[in-house]
Amino acid sequence: MFNAFLTPLRAAEWVVYAKPPFGGPQQVLEYLGRYTHRVAISNQRLLSLSDGQVSFQWKDYRSEHKQKSKTMTVQADEFVRRFLIHTLPPGFQRIRHFGFMANCHRKAKLALCRQLLTAPIQDLLPQPAECRQMLEAITEQSVIRCPRCGIGAMIGIAVLPHYRWPALPPDTS
């Protein structure tokens, strides 16, 4: 059944256009690498280590002055503990959130998701006619045509009730 659905898709000639990167593939890898292989704290943010204390720069994203860097000094063992919280075990890879969980619009998008989840399911799902049109556009075949002869139209006349197996014999008494 599923293979029959995929057969017309495999027969179609697909044209995919991907624009070449402006600076070449090396620049793309460097750009992505900054986000997927980022260290917990960069060397530029480390200010000093003296008397068993580490000073470093940080940004307070909860305050109204988001662009202003602040300085924090903690004990060296506390700094190491905080640093190790951000390191991953071998085999894991840190990927930043994207889509509705991206930082820039997370609050608004989550509110929209919550609003949509409270809506009746019928309002969220496409109508059967829309699904039928989409399936016909993808398969280039009519959904109501008989799959065997391709001429007659299939019309639903009844929905058969579900029976548990084995079906009970009819009552003849």
Image (cartoon, rainbow, N blue to C red):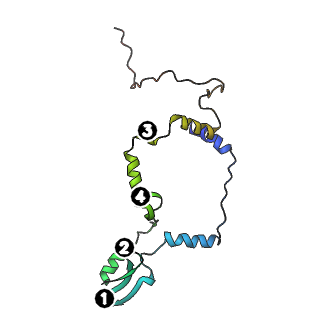
Residue 87: x and y in percent read 40, 72
Camera-side residue: 114 or 169?
Answer: 114
Q: Residue at left 31%, top 88%?
A: 52
The image's mark for residue 27 is: none
What residue did someone put label 2 on?
A: 64
Q: Residue at left 67%, top 57%?
A: 17
Q: How far separated are the C-alphas under marks 2 and 1?
A: 32 Å
Residue 100: x and y in percent read 45, 57
Residue 154: x and y in percent read 58, 24
Q: How far separated are the C-alphas under marks 4 and 2?
A: 19 Å
What residue did someone put label 1 on?
A: 52
Q: How far separated are the C-alphas under marks 3 and 2?
A: 42 Å
Q: How far separated are the C-alphas under marks 1 and 3?
A: 62 Å
Q: Residue at left 38%, top 79%?
A: 58
Local crowd at mark 2 within 10 Å, few (<14), some, or many (≥20)? few
Q: How far separated are the C-alphas under marks 1 and 4?
A: 43 Å
Camera-near label (1 vs 3) is 3
Label 3 or label 2, whichever comes before in sequence order:
2
The answer to whether residue 33 is left or right of residue 66 is right
In the displayed image of the protein, which residue is found farthest to the top? 173
Camera-side residue: 119 or 44?
Answer: 119
Label 4 or label 3, whichever comes before in sequence order:
4
> What element does badge 4 sit on?
helix
What residue did someone put label 3 on?
A: 122
Amino acid residing under circle 4 = Ala
Amino acid residing under circle 2 = Glu
Residue 13: x and y in percent read 70, 47
Residue 152 placement: quadrant: top right
Amino acid residing under circle 1 = Gly
Amino acid residing under circle 3 = Gln
